[in-house]
Image (cartoon, rainbow, N blue to C red):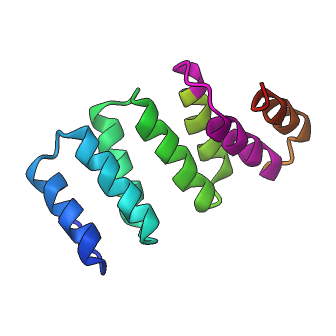
């Protein structure tokens, strides 16, 4: 079981431990982990969640955002493209993807996604 320095996060982790198949509880715990700065814990929760449901758009989005925070831009790009492949169009996805592409010095691709987020 994962343990953190945040009592709030520890409560959420206990719920995940008791009901590991509950993706909604897992997503809540991931959000709390990110809010409290525990990105390694968030990454672990995402990895095990994606093992259970590799096509869950919410988990893929969270994965992309956590990869962005960790400056893992190629991994962020893959996760955010997977969200778009699911048909989930949002400014958050396009802007995150544009940032990942920008940081890889793929300026034309980044611009394309910035324009895509304005539609």
Check residue 101 for magenta coloring.
yes
Q: Residue at x 45, y 62 (%)?
A: 34
Q: Is residue 102 visible?
A: yes
Quadrant in the picture for residue 9: bottom left
Task: Identify the main secondary structure in magenta.
Answer: helix
Report the side of 27 relative to 103 (left or right).
left
Where does the image place residue 20, in percent across and percent down from the top left?
16, 46
Quadrant in the picture for residue 5: bottom left
Check residue 15 for magenta coloring.
no
- Magenta stretch, residue numbers: 84-103
**23 above or below 42?**
above
Where does the image place residue 87, in percent across and percent down from the top left?
56, 18
Q: Residue at x 69, y 40 (%)?
A: 97
Q: Residue at x 43, y 36 (%)?
A: 58
Q: Is residue 39 visible?
A: no
**Residue located farthest toward the bottom when viewing the structure as drawn:** 5
Q: Quadrant of the C terminus?
A: top right
Quadrant in the picture for residue 23: top left
Report the side of 16 relative to 78 (left or right).
left
**Residue located farthest toward the front when viewing the structure as drawn:** 119
Where does the image place residue 1, in percent across and percent down from the top left?
17, 64
Where does the image place residue 44, in percent across and percent down from the top left?
35, 56
Q: Residue at x 27, y 41 (%)?
A: 24
Residue nearest the viewer, comparing 51 with 24: 24
**38 above or below 79?**
below
């Amino acid at each position: 079981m994962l343990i953190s320095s945040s009592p709030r996060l520890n409560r959420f982790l206990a719920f995940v431990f008791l009901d590991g198949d509950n993706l909604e509880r897992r997503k809540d715990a991931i959000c709390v982990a990110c809010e409290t700065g525990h990105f390694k814990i968030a990454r672990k929760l995402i990895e095990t969640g994606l093992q259970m449901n590799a096509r869950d758009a919410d988990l893929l989005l969270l994965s992309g955002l956590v990869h962005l925070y960790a400056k893992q831009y190629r991994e962020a790009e893959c996760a955010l493209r997977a969200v778009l492949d699911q048909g989930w169009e949002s400014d958050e996805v396009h802007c995150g993807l544009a940032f990942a592409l920008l940081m890889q010095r793929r300026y034309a691709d980044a611009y394309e996604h910035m324009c895509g987020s304005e539609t």
